Amino acid sequence: MRYAMIMAGGAGTRLWPMSRRDLPKQLIRFIAPPGGEPGDTPISLLDLAARRLEGLIDPAHRYLCTSETYRQAIRREIPGFEGEEADGRILGEPVGRDTVNAVALGAAVLEKADREAVFAVLTADHIIEPLEVFRDRMDLGFRLVEQDPRRLVTFSIKPTYPATGFGYVERGTPIRGIDRAQAGGEPLAFHVERFVEKPELPKAQAYVESGAFGWNSGMFVWKASVFLEALRKYMPDNHEAIRRIQDAWGTPDQARVLSEIYPALVRTSVDYGVMEPITRAKDRQFSVCTVQMDLRWLDVGSWPSFGETVPPDEFGNRLAGPSLPTVVKGKNNLIVSSVPGHTVAVLGVDDLIVVHTPDATLVMPRSRAEELKELHGKVDDKLR
């Protein structure tokens, strides 16, 4: 059976002061709903991610892996995860231990429920359009695994510029006879040659020019039991601990065992922990593949990237909030306010980011946005 698990545990410190411990970036309602009109009520990134599964995965087979502290907010805010039945599909981490353990927890829970479970791993912080292309490529990923359970499928995004903040996937030989070829007969599914993590600009430029690389999307499809076998081979201590959690899952000991074992797991990403070692070793026990996605893919992990979701005015200013800010003699500013009835006004400045909330206001040059984590660490704890 097909399942999906959305990973939604990030803290979102680069979207402070809107993103806080009790309202992380994936739950902030600041994204325009797809197909909506100006003035429509914004939705959250997590709501958007859940909507992408419509028509692709049965609602009863949709799971979320998130911080346990977000459980009630998710049940309150995200359609399809209300009620007692849905509570078991929210996998609450006692503490974040990066993506390899979030995926392993999902795999363990799903395998215990369904030995034949094949599941997609999805993210909660992306804008992905058009939905028809996304769903078609995800279906191809499922079919690749259903045809050969040894396959571990990742999705690579056709790059639009030489990004240095993303990982890259190099495509190898195409996989024939399964995908519905694009116009012109170009394949969509490939064996993976290698992964490259966040290259320097000259290499990123060469990768984009070669046409053989895509951005690593952080989305996957695999059989739950096969992923756990890969974990056993490349991270045996984590595998043993996850199996203990699996044994206790659904029993009165579930919460106790999870809280005792999970925080001690070695923390790393699924790429570093499993995918890259398999590829480097040319491990024939598994087959690492990628499906190319030619679509708009935006990682909303910082204020500049959020700005790309807001239409610019004639001077490049991007203004968002219930009471639109006012800019005079300024250009290329991003100004966001969450306070109804409060006007943020700027005069004669360019390339600023201004974010106003009821208890904190951020002002910084757009070029310094990546340093926001440093500021976040210095503000009063109650504002984090």
Image (cartoon, grey):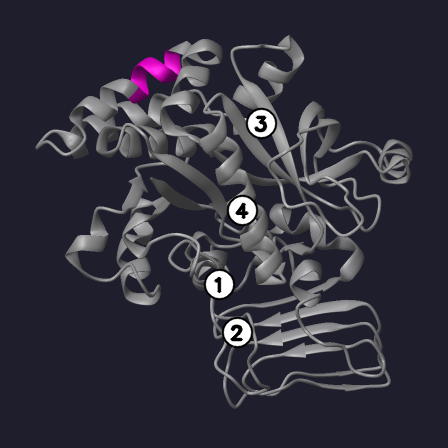
Q: CA distance from mark 4 to mark 2?
A: 21 Å
Which numbered marker is on residue 194? none
Within-10-Å neighbours for mark 4: few <14, some 14–19, many 20+ = many
Q: Is residue 337 above or below residue 102?
A: below
Upstream in sequence: badge 4 or badge 3: 4
Upstream in sequence: badge 3 or badge 1: 1
Splitting the image into 4 quarters, where does residue 83 fall? bottom left
Q: Amino acid at mark 4?
A: Met
Q: Which residue lies under the disc numbered 4?
A: 138
Q: Which residue lies under the disc numbered 2?
A: 33
Q: Main secondary structure of the magenta part?
A: helix
Q: CA distance from mark 3 to mark 1?
A: 25 Å
- Residue 125 image point, x, y percent: 54, 53
Q: Which residue lies under the disc numbered 1?
A: 48
Is 383 positioned to the left or the right of 219 in the image?
Answer: left
Q: Is residue 188 above or below residue 342?
A: above
Q: Which residue lies under the disc numbered 3?
A: 271
Upstream in sequence: badge 1 or badge 2: 2
Seen from the viewer's position, the closer of residues 369 and 160 is 160
- Total marks shown come to 4
